[in-house]
Image (spheres, rainbow, N blue to C red):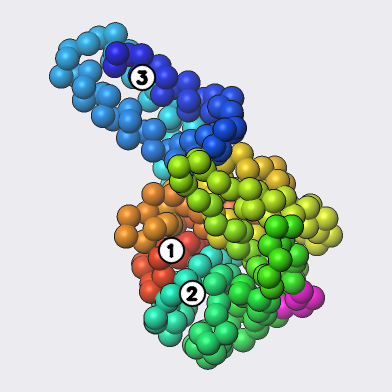
Amino acid sequence: MTAALAVLTAALLVFHGLVPNSPGGLGSLLESFLAWLGAVVTVLFGVALLRRSAVAVVALLLSTAAWTWSFGGLLLPGGEQRAGDLLVVQHNVSDENSDPVGTARALVEAEPDLIGLQELLPQALPAYEEELAAAYPYHAVRGTVGLWSRHPLAEARAVDIKPPGITEPWSRGLRAVAEAPGGEVAVYVAHLPSVRLGASGFRSSRRDESAELLGRAVGAEPVGPVVLLGDLNGTVDDRALAPLTSRLNVPERGFAPSFPTAFPVARIDQVMARSATVVHVRTLPATGSDHLPVAARISRA
C-alpha cells in the first residue's frame, strides 16, 4: 500500500496536467497545493522505514526524485545582486487592515524600487500616500490597486480585467511605465477575483476569466521589459494562470508562501516578468494584512 501511494504521488507530481479540471476544478485544486505532496512523501518515508519495506523505500525514492525535479530548484540560493537589478514588493494590504501606517512603514523598510498594493480602501489610501511619499514620490492608484515607485511613472491607466459576470463597479487592474535606471519598464498591478472551495468543488471561473483578460493585456504590451505585481489568487502551477505564465517568467528561486498569514500554505501573491528574470522571491514580516508581503529581485541582464 505504501509503495502504491508513493508511485501515485510521483505520478501526480509529474503528470498533474492530466488530472481533469471537471468536475469541481480538481486539476486546479491539486496544482494549487502541488508542492505539499513533498509532505506526503515525508510521511510515507516514515511509514516505510517503520515497516522496513524495501519496495516502498525504492518507490519513495522515485517520488522524491519527482518532487526534486519539480520544486528542488526553488531551494537553491538566489545568486548575487547585480547593478541594474530591481527590488519589488507585492502586497495585498487587506481591506480589514487596522494599521495601514504600520503596514506602509514595514514595506519601506525593505527598500524596494517598486511597491504594488491591492485592496486599497478610500479611507485608508491617505495613510499609505503620506507614509510612502518621502521614499516613493511617484505613485498611481486605479480603483483598489496602486503602484508606488522611486522612479518617475508615466502613462498610468486602468486595465480592464473585470469578468463579464460582475456588474457592479470593479477596478482591479493598473498599468504604468516606470522610468527605471537602465530603461523603461511596464509595470502591471492586478488583483484577480477570489476562489472558493465548497461542497461543489473548487470554484474559480471569475478568477480564470480575469486571468485571461490580464494575459491579453500583457501580451499586447508594447513596452519591454514587463513586471507584473499581483494577488492572483492562484499559484504559478495552477493551469488557470496559463494566460500569464505562458507569457511571463516566474521566480527561479524561493517558495515564499504568502497566504494566509497565520499559516501560509501557498504563494498566491505573484511577481512575474517578461524580457527579465525574477531571480529570487521571499516573504517579508507580517503586517496588519491576512497576506504576507512578497519581495522579489528582478534582473534585466
The residue that mark 1 highlights is 291
Q: Amino acid at mark 3?
A: Ala
Measured from the top left, where is residue 49 in percent x and y?
19, 19
Q: Are marks 3 and 2 in contact (CB under 8 Å)?
A: no
Note whether residue 156 is visible.
yes
Q: Position of residue 153 (x, y in %)?
A: 72, 78
Determine whether, in the image, residue 77 is placed left or right of residue 1.
right
Q: Secondary structure at mark 2?
A: loop
Residue plotted at (66% across, 76% down): 143
- Among numbered discs 1 and 2, the one appearing first in the sequence: 2
Q: CA–CA distance between discs 3 and 1?
A: 33 Å
Relative to 8, 207 lies left or right: right
Q: Residues within 10 Å of mark 3 (few under 14, many from 20)?
A: many
Residue at screen point 50% across, 88% down: 127
In the image, what residue occupies the spot 21% across and 25% down?
A: 46
Q: Is residue 52 left or right of residue 210?
A: left
Cα distance in 3D space between marks 3 and 2: 42 Å
> According to the image, label 2 marks what residue?
95
**Magenta-colored span:** 153-157
Q: Residues within 10 Å of mark 1 (few under 14, many from 20)?
A: many
Q: Nearer the viewer, mark 1 or mark 2?
A: 2
- As for residue 187 lying within the magenta part, the answer is no
Local secondary structure at mark 3: helix
Say which of 86 and 281 sits in front. 281
Does 169 appear above or below 62? Answer: below
Q: Nearer the viewer, residue 253 or 300?
A: 253
Question: Which of the labelled discs sits on residue 6, or is there none?
Answer: 3
Residue at the extreme front: 199
| Depicted 176 relative to depicted 55: above or below | below
